[in-house]
Image (spheres, rainbow, N blue to C red):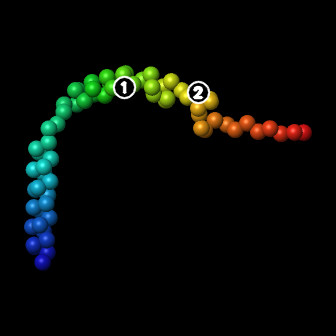
Amino acid sequence: ISGSSSVIAMKKGIQQLRLEAGLNRMKVPQAAADLKQFCLQNAQRDPLLTGVSSSTNPFRPQKFCSFL
């Protein structure tokens, strides 16, 4: 029983390796250039870079009114 399960596991592994070998891959310098271009194109809409206005910020500190 363990021999047949081992063969099945090996076949699944080989099938996965064949699938991954057939994928088209992008070179790292090209991927980095594309990522940099995307970041520069979208920088003006990135709230981490531009900040969030206090009127639209759901996490702004709440103002409490207290009477003494």
Q: Earlier in the sequence, mark 2 or mark 1?
A: 1
- Indicate which disc residue 53 carries: 2
> Residue 12, position in %: x, y?
13, 60
* Residue shown at the point (45%, 26%) measured from the top left: 45
> Residue 55, position in %: x, y?
62, 30
Q: Are marks 2 and 1 in contact (CB under 8 Å)?
A: no
* Residue shown at the point (49%, 29%) measured from the top left: 47
Q: Quadrant of the N terminus?
A: bottom left
* Residue shown at the point (11%, 55%) measured from the top left: 15
> Residue 41, position in %: x, y?
36, 22
Q: Secondary structure at mark 1?
A: helix
Residue on which disc 1 sits: 39
* Residue shown at the point (70%, 38%) measured from the top left: 62
Identity of the residue furthest to the bottom in this view = 1
User: Looking at the image, is 24 positioned above or below residue 49?
Assistant: below
Q: Amino acid at mark 1?
A: Cys
Q: Secondary structure at mark 2?
A: loop
In this rendered view, identify the residue nearer to me: 12 or 67: 67
